[in-house]
Image (tube, rainbow, N blue to C red):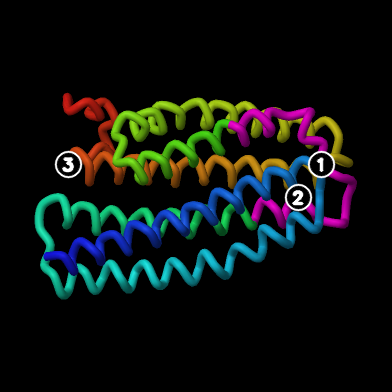
Amino acid sequence: MLQMIDRLGQLRGKVLTMANLVEKALDGSVRVLACQDELEARRVLDYEDAINTLEVETDQLATELLALNQPVAKDLRFITAAIKINSDLERMGDLAVNIARSSIRGDHRPMDIDTTEIPEMARRVQAMVRDAVQSFESSDDERAKRVLVSDDGVDEIKNRMFAQLVHGIEADATVASVNVDLIFVAHSLERIADHATNIAEDVLFFVKGLDVRHHRTSIDGKS
């Protein structure tokens, strides 16, 4: 029993270490987006290998726990959630790297993100990621619910920006290259928000036993 508790603690620690790296990669990619800093971009790219290594290690540990200990109840829910969160974190890391790469392309003028809602969108996504990670760290279902509520606002910003950027291309073809990269960045931010939402849903699953993936109205235990 003590060994099982220790191994669950190791699993939790690996997920949190990976989450910390993902947060750093996202924060760095947002800084690159703001100033096209190639040195900062290289730092973001360096996180990718560490995140990928942790993903493999976390998957292996979780699989061993399932195979060798036959966990039940909350322990089983926790391990299942950790496996899914692990996958979401790896994708978030990839998306943060994609944002950094898009922000330092040398074939056109720097992206003027202040003419769009990207800075506000980035702030909201960063807040969602922080809340999702902290909800996992502290088993805080209320913080997890806050992430779910925030997702719609990010989607609304993305939809407005897509319309604005496409209209800009139609009006002036010379901005096409920049606007396409901005559309790609907005899409990546929106996908990161989706993965943060997935993590929050998994926290609710292992803390409360609630599956709210396709029926958000049940986050308070009501349908």
Instruction: Please name the residue that numbered disc 2 is placed on.
Output: 103
Q: In the rendered image, is residue 184 in sight?
A: no
Q: What is the quadrant of residue 120 in the picture?
A: top right
Instruction: Please name the residue that numbered disc 1 is placed on.
Output: 111
Q: What is the quadrant of residue 137 in the picture?
A: top left
Query: Percent position (x, y) of residue 173?
Result: 85, 40
Q: Secondary structure at mark 2?
A: helix
Q: Earlier in the sequence, mark 1 or mark 2?
A: 2
Q: Secondary structure at mark 3?
A: loop
- Alpha-carbon span between mark 3 and mark 1: 44 Å
Q: Are marks 3 and 1 in contact (CB under 8 Å)?
A: no
Residue 88 sits inside the magenta stretch: no
Instruction: Please name the residue that numbered disc 3 is placed on.
Output: 209
Residue at image location 35% in from the left, 45% down from the top: 136
Q: Are marks 1 and 2 in contact (CB under 8 Å)?
A: yes
Q: Earlier in the sequence, mark 3 or mark 2?
A: 2
> Which quadrant is the N terminus positioned in?
bottom left
Q: Nearer the viewer, residue 101 or 43?
A: 43
The residue stretch that appears in magenta: 98-123
Residue 121 sits inside the magenta stretch: yes
Q: Nearer the viewer, residue 118 or 44?
A: 44
- Alpha-carbon span between mark 1 and mark 2: 7 Å
> Residue placed farthest to the front in the image?
2
Q: Which mark is residue 206?
A: none
Give amino acid for label 2: Ser
Q: In the rendered image, is residue 192 in sight?
A: yes
97 left or right of 109 in image: left
46 left or right of 111 in image: left
* Residue 73 drawn above or below residue 171: below
Q: Nearer the viewer, residue 108 or 195?
A: 195
